[in-house]
Amino acid sequence: MALNPLFFRKTLVAGTGLFLCIFLIVHLSANCILLLPEDMARELYNSYSTTLRESLLIKIVAYLLYLSIILHVVYALLITLRNRKAKPQKYVVNHTKDNSTWTSQNMGIIGTLILLFIIIHLANFWARIKLGIGESPGFDATGNIDVYEVTYSLFQNIYYVIFYTLLMIPLGLHLHHGLKSAFKTLGFYHKKGLKILAKISLVYAAIMAIGFGIIPCVVYLK
């Protein structure tokens, strides 16, 4: 029996989305180092970053992460385009909002904002440190690349801090809707379980959005 293309796409989006959700937990945990006093934060953050760059296992996970982001974006876009093409002609009375949330109706816009954030974020951090594009980062007292200084300097730019913080709003909306939808796509339809999942999704999304959003503000005020 042939595999349904739409089912395959949705499953891929759901699977990669859950993988990215796990990554965000690890990423936020590491970023919390930035909240420590500067001397301690610099040493720990740079040591952590060096470990990530030199570990073979982490490199493999990193490539899986890049692939997941690409697949998630591409197939989410294909699903969005297909859904728009398949929509019937709009009538005077439209009950769409009665059957779905604002977030679910605007996941395309929200996803585009997040993609914009990822591109700018990677250009400022990943491209500079991993690819050597732009001004070369210095080294700390222990000889590690001073990733902390790169991060700290960027978070001293009030415009970037505002941009970074505000973009956590669409991230939170995306995670709240996406986490629930991912489990449904993968076949989880237990009635009571879905109610619990909805609460977990809300808490998770709030922690991620507030956590990532508050760190640049704290660093800026140091």
Image (cartoon, helix red, strand yellow):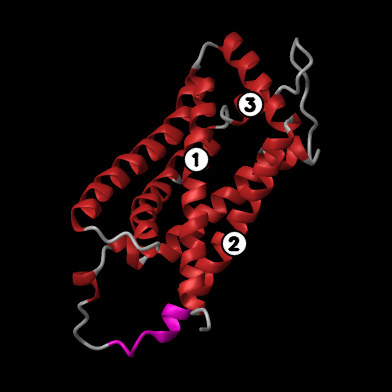
Q: Earlier in the sequence, mark 1 or mark 2?
A: 1
Check the image and name the residue furthest to the front: 1
Q: Hey, what amino acid is under mark 3?
A: Ser
Q: Which residue is mark 3?
A: 153
Q: Earlier in the sequence, mark 2 or mark 3?
A: 2
What numbered label is drawn on residue 71?
2
Q: Hey, what amino acid is under mark 2?
A: Leu
Say few, some or many: other residues with alpha carbon within 10 Å of mark 1 (under 14 / 14 to 19 / 20 or more).
Answer: some
Say few, some or many: other residues with alpha carbon within 10 Å of mark 2 (under 14 / 14 to 19 / 20 or more).
Answer: some
Q: Hey, what amino acid is under mark 1?
A: Leu
Find numbered disc 2 in the image and state the secondary structure of the residue it sits on: helix
Residue 59's quadrant in the figure? top right
Between the C-alphas of marks 1 and 3, the distance is: 23 Å
The reply to whether dot 1 and dot 2 touch (C-beta < 8 Å) is no
Find numbered disc 3 in the image and state the secondary structure of the residue it sits on: helix
Give the x, y percent position of residue 71: 59, 61
Q: Nearer the viewer, mark 1 or mark 3?
A: 1
Between the C-alphas of marks 1 and 2, the distance is: 17 Å
Q: Which residue is mark 1?
A: 24
Give the x, y percent position of residue 79: 48, 73
